Image (cartoon, rainbow, N blue to C red):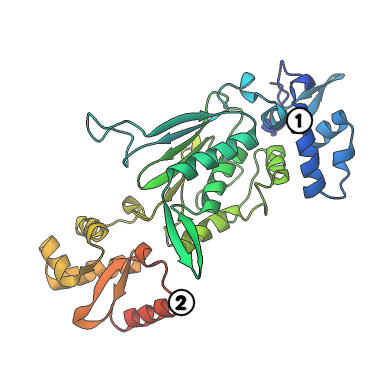
Amino acid sequence: MKSHPQKPDLQIVEGAGLGDLDAALLDDYRQRLAERRPGSGLETLPLEMLLLRVGAANRQGKRIRPTVAGILFFAADPQRFFPSLTTTFLHFPGTTISRQDDEAPLYLDNRELTGPVPEMIEDARAAIYQATRKEAVVEGFVRHDVTEYPEFAVREAVVNAVAHRDYRRTGSFIQIRLFSDRLEVQNPGGLTGGVTVDNIVYEQFTRNPYIVRFLEDYGYVERRGLGIDEMIASMERAGLAPPRFDDRQTSFWVTLYNRATSFDPASLGLNERQLRALDYLRKRGRISNREYQALNEVAERTALYDLQELVKKDLLLPMSSGRGRYYILKSANRRQTNEERQRIGNSTSRRS
């Protein structure tokens, strides 16, 4: 690839020509331009001028050659030029990549997703949807499915992996790993441009501006810069913990926790008694102070302190009051009305 300063997606792909771009994909893109950028006139431009304007091609001397962005979106077989620019989907039966026992399968699904970027995104969405649990909910006379993870959060994690991966690392691929308690999406290349895990909600930097613009034209990016906010909000609305972001410098990970374990205990500084109580709650659904005492062989005061801390960490909700008080997992109470939440909050403020 010929280097282009600070724009990996605008690099020319050596060995590729305009004939490697698929006419049907380009015609489809013109239609999308007419819908997404009305009045721009881009959809009516001659082919070479259009490709140059949108960053799908670049000049190399007197020739016009496809760029990384152009090949990824408009070549029928981008992996002919970039064999590792793919997405892998792995579905594990448990919470680790290890077998539960010698007879258990290592994974439930293992596939490599290829093709142009929009096709890979749709295939990833379908694979995740098929493999995750759905819960039937009836509102009025209408029945609909609630997915294990909010669709927006899943889409944002996958699309961001495509948008912000480091395309100079041509030996790496995007990984999607589904476990019984979480969904992980990893893209090659860590955060850059001053963006960190701490400021990712309000800072922006686009490593691949042309790829991001194509994603906008295809409708995968709607309001640039607000996706992370909405991802967090969608998880909160579903009663789940916020996404976990992990910058490993050579890769970036987004982890979504499901309703079974909608938090990461390791990141919360919980003691062994509290972890034991959370496991008890997942199995029994509720726990009282007295049950906590018996479970951990501690005094009433210690049990009360531990339970109060779990409430403060937004993991438990106290129910009832006085000697009849018990606690449930916060995620299990996600469908309560605002009035019920306010009543519980008032009760908590009177006696925690």
Q: Earlier in the sequence, mark 1 or mark 2?
A: 1
Q: At label 1, which amino acid type do we have?
A: Ala
The answer to whether 257 is drawn above or below residue 329 in the figure is: above
Contact between labelled residues 2 and 1, with CB atoms less than 8 Å apart: no
> In front: mark 1 or mark 2?
1
- Quadrant for the C terminus in the image: bottom left
Residue at 65%, 43% (x, y): give it.
206
Category of crowding for the residue at label 2, using alpha-carbon neighbours closer than 10 angstroms: few (below 14), some (14–19), many (at least 20): few
Q: Secondary structure at mark 1?
A: helix
Residue at 74%, 26% (x, y): give it.
22
Residue identified by numbered label 1: 24
Residue at 67%, 30% (x, y): give it.
72
Comparing 250 with 26, the one in front is 26
Comparing 205 with 114, the one in front is 114
Residue at 43%, 34% (x, y): give it.
90
Q: Quarter of the image holding residue 115?
A: top right
Residue 174, image x and y in percent?
A: 52, 33
Left-right relation of 217 to 88: right
Look at the image and tell me whether residue 73 can be seen.
yes
Category of crowding for the residue at label 1, using alpha-carbon neighbours closer than 10 angstroms: few (below 14), some (14–19), many (at least 20): few
Comparing 254 with 288, the one in front is 288
Q: CA distance from mark 1 to mark 2?
A: 50 Å
Residue lying at the far top of the rendered structure: 15
Residue 286, image x and y in percent?
A: 24, 66
Left-right relation of 81 to 322: right
Residue identified by numbered label 2: 338
Q: At label 2, which amino acid type do we have?
A: Asn
Residue lying at the far front of the rendered structure: 141
Residue 82, image x and y in percent?
A: 61, 22
Q: Quarter of the image holding residue 98?
A: top left
Q: Secondary structure at mark 2?
A: helix
